[in-house]
Image (spheres, rainbow, N blue to C red):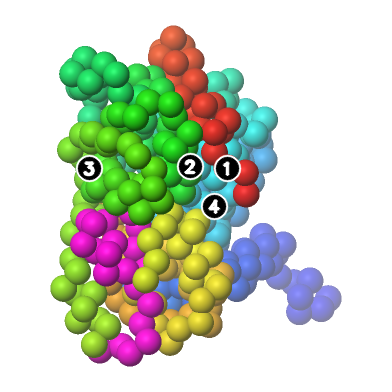
């Protein structure tokens, strides 16, 4: 008997899985300043193997937002990306079950677009400071105050808010969509800072609109400040600063590039610079460490506490036997109204 044949097949499968994970996570930090090693991958290999087996058994698909931990994205995810991309994948999906490793409003969007699937969230506490800043009732009051305004909601909003809106947008398609709306007055919810950035950008593009916003902010993006950008530029000559439009207008003005998650990734991959400062969630840096390992990033990104509530264990539990609190349910009338605002976005959004 050879040495290899003496090893039980289960051990061989585990070792092959650990090596697959190690190749995928090689350049990614598993904690600040420490990258994944083979021992760490061996620790999580039993779980990723179990999840990938359960996925087949349950006819499930796992959608992973770029801000969740890389071992979820690269270990068990079927699709990775931003809210817009993942909403397209949810809409196309024919799977019986969708596990959404992201935050609750994203899973709601998946349920709106894929109503026959069982949509589950690993952790029901994974809210979002932005989406949770405005309820459907509050939006109805705003609509009453501005009856002539078109209601445009950012995709980072609850199903209730989407149901009250004329059209849903993302940070990537918002300018083109608003420019096509016949109304001059726009009620943009729920992100005040992004609203200010949109106002500036529309003006720059010569689009004449009056933008009214509600008062929400993203707790990850609203804390970056322009002074630290100046400081970083002095310390790292040639630095390129990349920001998300959920940052303040001062930070957006200080950045070299402002764009959606997908646009930021494209910019970094296509730009030659000695260093990048990413003014966004650290998960995006993790993805770039995998997909563009030749790039160098200086510190600055921030963690989203809601996204980090996702874990491999919770993904496994949601797949195996979801608890009622992990299953996303929506009133059918509300779901249909929310679907209209999202479908209108798909109609008006520019094709890539
Ligand atoms: S990063 Fe900001 S917008 Fe995204 S889920 Fe976290 S709190 Fe919400």
- Judging from the image, what secondary structure is the residue with disc 3 in? helix
Q: Are marks 2 and 1 in contact (CB under 8 Å)?
A: yes
Viewer-nearest of labels 4 and 3? 3
CA gap, disc 4 to disc 3?
A: 27 Å
Q: Earlier in the sequence, mark 3 or mark 2?
A: 2
Residue 148 is one of the magenta-drawn residues: no
- Judging from the image, what secondary structure is the residue with disc 1 in? loop
CA gap, disc 3 to disc 1?
A: 24 Å
The spot of residue 282 in percent (x, y) is 35, 64
Residue with the mark numbered 1 = 350
Marker count (numbered): 4
Residue with the mark numbered 2 = 176
Magenta range is 235-255
Viewer-nearest of labels 3 and 1? 1
Residue 16 found in image quarter: bottom right
Residue with the mark numbered 3 = 192
CA gap, disc 4 to disc 1?
A: 21 Å
């Amino acid at each position: 008997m050879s040495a290899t044949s003496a090893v039980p097949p289960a051990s061989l499968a585990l070792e092959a899985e650990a090596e697959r994970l190690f190749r995928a996570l090689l350049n990614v930090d598993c904690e600040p300043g420490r990258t994944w090693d083979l021992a760490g991958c061996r620790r999580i290999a039993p779980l990723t193997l179990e999840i990938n087996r359960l996925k087949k058994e349950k006819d499930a698909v796992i959608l992973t937002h770029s801000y969740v931990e890389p071992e979820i994205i690269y270990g068990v995810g079927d699709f990775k990306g931003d809210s817009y991309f993942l909403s397209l994948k949810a809409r196309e999906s024919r799977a019986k079950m969708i596990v959404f490793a992201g935050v609750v409003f994203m899973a709601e969007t998946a349920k709106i677009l894929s109503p026959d699937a069982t949509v589950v969230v690993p952790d029901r506490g994974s809210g979002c400071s932005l989406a949770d800043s405005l309820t459907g009732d509050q939006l109805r009051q705003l609509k009453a105050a501005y009856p002539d305004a078109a209601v445009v909601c950012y995709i980072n909003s609850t199903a209730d808010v989407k149901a009250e809106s004329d059209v849903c947008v993302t940070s990537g398609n918002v300018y083109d969509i608003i420019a096509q709306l016949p109304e001059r007055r726009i009620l943009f919810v729920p992100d005040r800072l992004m609203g200010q950035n949109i106002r500036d950008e529309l003006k720059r593009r010569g689009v004449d609109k009056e933008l009214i916003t509600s008062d929400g902010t993203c707790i990850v993006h609203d804390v970056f400040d322009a002074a630290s950008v100046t400081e970083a530029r002095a310390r790292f000559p040639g630095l390129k600063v990349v920001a998300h439009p959920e940052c303040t207008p001062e930070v957006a003005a200080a950045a070299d590039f402002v764009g959606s998650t997908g646009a930021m990734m494209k910019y970094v991959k296509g730009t030659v610079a000695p260093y990048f400062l990413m003014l966004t969630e650290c998960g995006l840096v993790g993805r770039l460490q995998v997909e563009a390992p030749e790039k160098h990033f200086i510190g600055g990104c921030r963690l989203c506490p809601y996204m980090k509530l996702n874990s491999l264990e919770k993904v496994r539990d949601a797949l195996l036997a979801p608890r009622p609190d992990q299953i996303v349910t929506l009133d059918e009338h509300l779901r249909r109204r929310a679907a209209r605002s999202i479908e209108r976005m798909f109609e008006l959004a520019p094709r890539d």
